[in-house]
Image (spheres, rainbow, N blue to C red):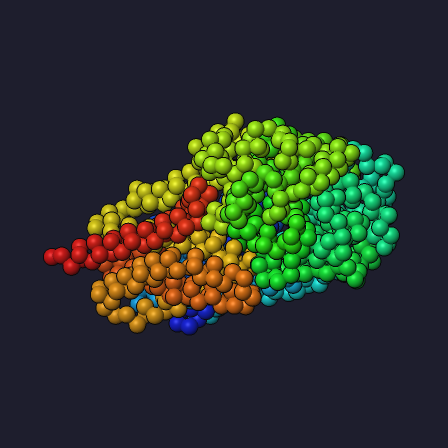
Amino acid sequence: MKSCNLPQSTRATGWTCAGLFMVTLSTLMFEILLTRIFSVTMWYHFAFVAISLAMFGMTVGALIVYLLPAFFAAERVKHHLALSALLFSLCSVVSFLAHLRIPFILYGDKLVGLPYVVLTYLVVSLPFVFSGIAVCLALTRFPGQIGRLYGFDLAGAALGCIVLIYTLEVTDGPTAVLVVAALTALGSLLFAAEAGCGRLKWVAAAVAALFLTGSVWHTVLVHRQRPLIRLSRIKGRRDPPPLYEKWNSFSRLDVTGDPDELHTPFGWGLSAVCPPELKARELQMRIDGEAGTVLTAFDGDLRNVEHLKYDVTSLVHWVRRDGDVLVVGSGGGRDVLAALAFGQKSVRAVEMNGDIIRAVTGRFGDYTGHLDRNPKVRFVNDEARSYIARLKEKFDILQVSLIDTWAATAAGAYVLTESLLYTVEAWDTFLDRLKPQGVLTFSRWYYRDRPGEMYRLVSLASASLARRGVANPRDHILVAGRRNWEHFGNVQPGRDEDAPEGVGTILVSPDRFSPRDVERFEEVCMRLKFDVVLTPRVAADDTFARLASGKDLQAFTRTLPINITPPTDDSPFFFHMLWLRDIFNKDARYQGQMTFNMKAVAVLGLLLAAVVILTLLCIVLPLLLTTRRGVLKGSLPLFFYFSGIGMGFMLIEISQMQRLNVFLGHPVYGLSVVLFALLLSSSAGSALTQKIRNGGGTATACLLLLLGALALFGWLTPGAIRWFHASVTGLRIAVAVGVLFPLGLFMGMAFPLGMRFASGRSPALTPWLFGINGATSVCASVLAVVIALTTSISATFWTGLACYGAAFAAYQWARRRNEAP
């Protein structure tokens, strides 16, 4: 703009650092926020794709800087910083509003739906192109201050994940987009103030004020349950305004229905003999627009909830009476009411999502009968597994009924997260918290002819019991199922190829079920017309019998067409049953269970192929388009170096988010602690490199220390997790930060050290190298999940270490070339 004072300084001042800080803070906020929004409007595996494409958008921005050196001239760099940040701010709002208008078609004609998905990704990736331009300019145009600038870059990203968590506690997802736009416009203002661009400065200030005012005003409307901007399309269908809506960093809750309507009650697996005169008033609560539970109207008279005794998920109460019950995932309170209906002694309900508890006992407390005031009932807001590990009390029943959500948590968008309740280590903890003759019960989707989830539950039960020294696990396992959806009341799933036939329930006890227990179980199943799937005397098929025997379990499961090996904390992917060889085999995806999660794995495979192709294009296309061939001479070692650290950083980061998510328990902690600690410590490491003047020996020593820290971390962390897994939350957070900080400190040094070396050799090459680093990070973000799914989380980590080892070798190669005559 004409009002800019030229030429601009080639030295980055505090204004530039502050502007970069705001841009990277906003970028990470917007990336993670999109995974939350896409998890509601689409599905969690599409949300995961959004993260990769957002990162790729930034890579494209870097390559634009490389391919247009005359346009991004050094004397106007600060003007372009301010302009690109402002365009990022405006595009973030425009792309979000456009996304709300683009239909999402998943089922039906795939050729019709695919263009809409592609269009969505193109639209939402545009803001990240401008973010990539700004970040690339900041990190490549001031080579003498790369350590300081990269430190501000990482610090902004680290704070961004924390700011988003608290933003979504205060307001909703659409309003958070306005907050992101306001913060980015503030970054543009900081850049423009230093550049002396008067007109651009005033435009940025006006945009920041507009979006900030809009976010405050809209937050007021959100708290009044009257937002102007809302997600009206949920997973391809029109969604009317709910009675109540609440967002947080890992879910979007809404409550719908007619509170006065009396109808046939909902049931996960309601018996065909449930008396038709039993009616109930219920509201539906949904998580991310799909995973549901119900709020049952309750006036204190247990006769009004008799229908709960006819649900297959309540089978355990027929076998164990007058006991202490621990419910994992209280939801709308159905399992709590069921325990009360059976006259159990006490009920403790653990719910990770505090907004669910507040909705059930607060907002709709009068409707649900204020279960929290019942002297038998106690609600606990905590992550169940870590809470149970810390408990000293023991229970007669520990119940878990269909509590996974198919939702993308903020951390889960990076790690394709799974419920950590379905691992051998988790079940060890659960079985330890049972009294003599106590029972652990899980309910999952059930298919008579392809019961993949029930197979895997039996496999998991057998492995857990075998670890406890049980010789014949079958004597400790009971399984039943309820088929046919027509008795499920007013909440009916769509009838498609993915829909399960019903729900199955498994009962597992560390003590042998007595003949009387087995007779009682079989008698109740016969009376309620449930399928008896597995008992010590009956097995629905040979696979159930073989799995329950516990003999050669690993060898046997490898012979089956789907993967039902017992999940572990190092490979906690209970719902993903495709073998690697079948990832693109459509016929294999229809074996064993509802294919929804298997489709997610197929999407992951397609995404991996796509990002590999796009990464190659990022490497090859600039080489074909550039006319400055001489610049590239001798750049091969640098190419390998920046590829290695890009792959290595992302593989290490994602593997630790996966691993420490188990340790910390809560998805908010998995995001805020792991990502924040790793990025902030990397920021400190980058800042320290500003003091390194002789790039050679000192840089080599730093990279060697990085390799040593990674190896030590990989060796010590599993033991530290086992040692402190039952500690209080504060101590576990301190341990996680303690092990992550030195790791991040050295990881943060690799990029600025390499960039300083490259700048001294060929400054024109640095934007391309920055793009290569970003492109390989995109590739690694998908590859990390593929490695973990097919092997283990540990394998992902050690692959990251190998990438850093290759980068170290490439750095030494580059040094020798540079020192040669």
Image vertical order of residue 503 relative to residue 69, above or below:
above
- Residue 167 x, y percent position in the rendering: 60, 62
Q: Which residue lies furthest to the left in this view?
A: 821
- Residue 319 x, y percent position in the rendering: 72, 44
Looking at this view, is 811 or 443 the one in front?
443
Does residue 368 appear left or right of residue 174 in this picture?
A: right
Task: Please identify the quadrant where the C terminus is shown.
Answer: bottom left
Looking at this view, is 589 or 62 the one in front?
589
- Residue 422 x, y percent position in the rendering: 56, 47
Does residue 797 appear left or right of residue 102 in this picture?
A: left
Looking at this view, is 110 or 626 the one in front?
110
* Rendering quarter of residue 715: bottom left
- Residue 593 x, y percent position in the rendering: 59, 34
Looking at this view, is 547 or 445 the one in front?
547
Q: Can residue 39 be seen in this view?
A: no
Q: Is residue 564 visible?
A: yes
Image vertical order of residue 234 relative to residue 807, above or below:
above
> In the image, what residue occupies the spot 25% across and 53% down?
810
> In the image, what residue occupies the spot 50% across and 30% down?
561
* Rendering quarter of residue 178: bottom right
> In the image, what residue occupies the spot 26% across and 65% down?
701
Does residue 509 appear left or right of residue 775 in this picture?
A: right
> In the image, what residue occupies the spot 78% across and 34% down?
527
